[in-house]
Image: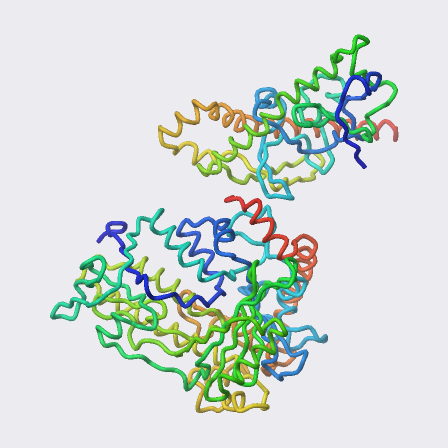
Amino acid sequence: MKAGGFSITLVESPDIKIIGVGEGTWPTMRSSLERMGVSETDLFKHCDAAFKQGGKFAGWTTGAADDAYYHPLMLPHGFAQVNLVPHWLQRTNTQSFCDFVTPQGRLCDDGLAPKLITSPEYKGLANYAYHLDAGKFAPFLAQHCTQKLGVRHVLANIVSVDQAESGDIRGVLTKEAGEIRGDLFIDCSGFNALLIGKTLGVGFKDCGDILFCDTALASQVPYLTPDDPMPSQTIATAQDAGWIWDICLPTRRGVGYVYSSRHTNEEAARETLQKYIGPQSRDLPIRKIPIRSGHRQTFWKNNCVAIGLAGGFLEPLESSAIVLVELSAKLLAEQMPANRHVMDIVAKRFNDVTMYRWGRIIDFLKLHYVLTRRTDSAFWRDNVDPATIPDRLKELLELWKFHPPWFFDEFDRLEEVFPAASYQYVLYGMGFASESSPEDVVDTGLQAARMRQETERQTQDLRGRLPANRDLLNKIREYGLQPV
Amino acid sequence: MTQIVPLNKETYSTLKVDGRASAAHGDSQRFVQVIVKEFPHLVVHYPILFSKDPQTGQFFCGAMLGFDEGENLFLEDWQQRELYRPLYLQRGPFYANGPELAIDLDDPRVGVEGGKSLFTEQGTPSRYLQSIIWAFQDLKPGTEMTRLFIARLLELKLIEPVDVEVEFDDGTMRRCVGLYTIDQDVLSRLPDSVVVELFRRGYMRLIHYMIASLKQVPVMARKRNARLLKGTEGLASAVG
């Protein structure tokens, strides 16, 4: 199997419906799609895609009416040269950390798009990801892969799996298309985990003791008028027993409540969601989706690698599930084993990296909960119980009291899912108190002042040039974006 | 305001229009849209480049006339009728109205003394109006042909951004952004079949006009330098 010297067959059950939520992505999606040769214009036109410039977390720290912070997608200005956290801690004004280091929160406040109609595909003036209709995105990608990339797409139900004595999978027997053989099997069978779980017996590592949310109620909310304002940030609003996502597509909003069934019941959760949506919610169907937070104990066993829900799932707080799909697929493509002989070596690497990534994502999601000062419900009180906090995160929180996260932190893996900047945005967005003294900022004072000036200048410049989010999306649907 | 009405010889038999190049009436721009049919005329004077419409993001072809906003280094040449003036400027206050011509009566160039008559005493189009009719005969299909040309180049990834950076004798620099030209690396790697296709469609010639026209940038810079020099000489004599 040399590069390009293999063929790919996708076996998809025509009877199992896709989950169809998970409408937020990470900016990695831009490079993933560009690498696949997908036109961004087509994505906007066919998947009801919109821009995402970050997450806005409302009510997570105190639950007060004005309690909100951004986790934007742009790094703090000059992040590679200077850590602005100590400078922010020593600031003399009341500016939020986000506004202190980047224009993006203010772009979101103003409802601006991250680029211009003249910006080429996949290029932005501000970093961005997408909100999209997952139900349209899957067939869109399938069409691209079959028509442009030569993937064979077989619609069939798998009835049994043929294994060699070594445990390797020789083929899958389907009801509609007979036996399909292969050298390497990627298990994308969703929560079923047909190959990695049921066939190869790899166990599931539940992390419901760390992340409590185990159920989602999902709804789709129409706009009242075609030009209703359309934020480009995912809004996550904390509730008694979880949080509500609010995502704007050009055609509708996706709104859903992710909650812990140990801390509330379905009826109360429905009420909470309906109250959030408002009077419109009466006629809207609500779909219930169980969430099993956790992941496989091993992701690649024998000649089978699990990607997607078969590998694991976590509450959709930071769009991490889809990032892991992208990173896993990229890792697999880049390190595709040349033969069965070396496959176990590649598999070991894949497992190490992927296990590390799941751990870091769990830590990062938990970070959003452990910094809360809310005590108004058992959900929030239980979340700060030290017994529910992973050791590594506990240790980092100790460290960060004196050393704000930056480079040289433990973030040592290539392509860290959430860079140190993300930790900064959440920590200082939630008012985490790192000790700092005026001496900390003496050496880098001039540099930091320059970064601050540039951020202000950039903010002004972008505010003057960027169009409204909805206006640009309308224009893209009419004229398209240029490839250069 | 604009008041665009169909042109007919009954109503407008005595109307006069000043079609000369003038800074006040649309000629003071540094970049003007052009069509592919004009390339042979343009290449000997102006850099021919692509740019994007700020409203739609769509590419169009244009001739570069200056370095600064509102700067047209060729205006005096046009006023002396020495150089080719792109059709989008030649057309003056006229518009296409289906197959007919229309005119903007509120345009300041319309109905002025010293302008040119549109019709002869016999009621036939004057030489001036005839030149406008010809301009539109070229412009209408030409705009579509140019669009097709650009679309094919985009498909072949033959368009790339270009930084036009110039330093002038007075020490100032100009960096013109938002301009695009032919990607010559991609061009040199095109498969034979595509090369033949581009040649047969007449696109290869246009591509080479665009590449050759880049050499007009330093010529334009010298023109500007000469103007700067003239300015300082004037200053020197005034001081003297």
- The image shows residue A415, relative to residue B86, as above or below, that is below
**In terms of depth relative to the viewer, which is nearer, B161 or B198?**
B198
Residue at 49% across / 86% down in the picture?
A: A265
Q: Is residue B198 above or below residue A109?
A: above
Residue extending farthest top: B122
Horizontal and vertical percent position of residue B183: 48, 36
**Residue farthest left in this picture:** A165
* Residue A14 locus on image (x, y percent): 32, 61
In-front residue for pair A222/A420: A222
Is residue A181 visible in the rendered image? The answer is: no
B106 sits left or right of A316 in the view: right
**Measured from the top left, where is residue A112 in percent x and y?**
64, 59
Question: In the image, A339: left or right of A316?
Answer: left
- Locate residue B85, reporting x and y percent: 68, 22
Colouring mode (rainbow / by chain / secondary structure / one colour): rainbow
> Relative to A174, is B122 on the left or the right?
right
Find residue B188 and report its image quarter.
top left
Is A105 positioned to the left or the right of A122 in the image?
A: right
Residue A150 seen by the camera = yes
Q: Residue at x 69, y 32 (%)?
A: B66
Count of marks placed on residues = 0
